[in-house]
Amino acid sequence: MSAPLDLLLQVQELDTAADQLRHRRQTLPQRAELAAVEAQRAELDARSSEVRARRGELAAQQQVLEDHIESSRRRRSTLESQLYGGQVAAARDLQAMNDEVRNLAAHISALEDRELEVMEAIEPLDGELQAAEVRRDELDGAAAALRRPIAEQETAIDAELADQLGQRSQLAQQLPADLLTRYEALRSRLGGTGAARLVGNSCSGCHLTLPSMEVDRIRKAPPDTIVTCEQCGRILVR
Ligand SMILES: [Zn+2]
């Protein structure tokens, strides 16, 4: 086995190990859990904003009712002070004012009933918003508890990755540039493996058995010749 090809296989091993580390980094089990917690949080926020909007509408209705109640009360007390102040003498006027006072009382009472209904409709919404607040804190706590181990593992993996990349670049710079370029092109095209060992009659890259004539040709080729697997195209290392 020629030295460059031996080196190339070591580079391949480091590249594979680095790919595995990157994959592990991306698929940390806590990531899926965190995504689920974040999805619940988003759903909760969406629901809360709907509830808050509904609550806002009801509060606006309550305000309108209160304003009506307030102006009706003012009108009633004006009428009452006129009625009992003795400035109105005509019986017909007094009767009309009395009627209006009675009507206002009924109107105020109806408005108050309506206001009570609105307040009763607001109550469960406030309850839901409070419960959502508690749930939000729980979810935030759960998310923080998941982010911590994720960050720790990322740091550990990044350190390992940096170490491997350091070794890889040291080895790679000892390879002929054209061989490295060819390997890297194959590696990016063929799912991360650009160089494979010939094990018995099969290529360890594609795991297919090569025809014996082909294996024979490969074995007889001068050691510094770059041979490739005729099935997958990877550089074959004897
Ligand atoms: Zn192959």
Image: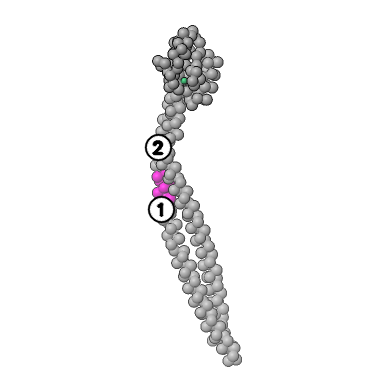
Indicate left or right for 177 with 35 as reference.
right
User: Label 2, on which residue?
Assistant: 29
- Quadrant the N terminus occupies: top left
| Amino acid on which the number 2 mark rests in the picture | Pro
Q: Kindly state the secondary structure of the residue where label 1 is placed.
A: helix
- The answer to whether residue 163 is visible is no
Q: CA distance from mark 1 to mark 2?
A: 26 Å
**Mark 1 or mark 2: which is in front?**
2
Q: Nearer the viewer, residue 76 or 31?
A: 31
Q: Nearer the viewer, residue 35 or 125?
A: 35
Q: Provide residue 168's location: percent of width, then percent of height.
A: 47, 20
Q: Which mark is residue 112?
A: none
Indicate left or right for 192 with 29 as reference.
right
- The answer to whether residue 68 is visible is yes
| Up-down relation of residue 115 to residue 216 (above or below) | below
| Amino acid on which the number 1 mark rests in the picture | Val
| Up-down relation of residue 115 to residue 223 (above or below) | below
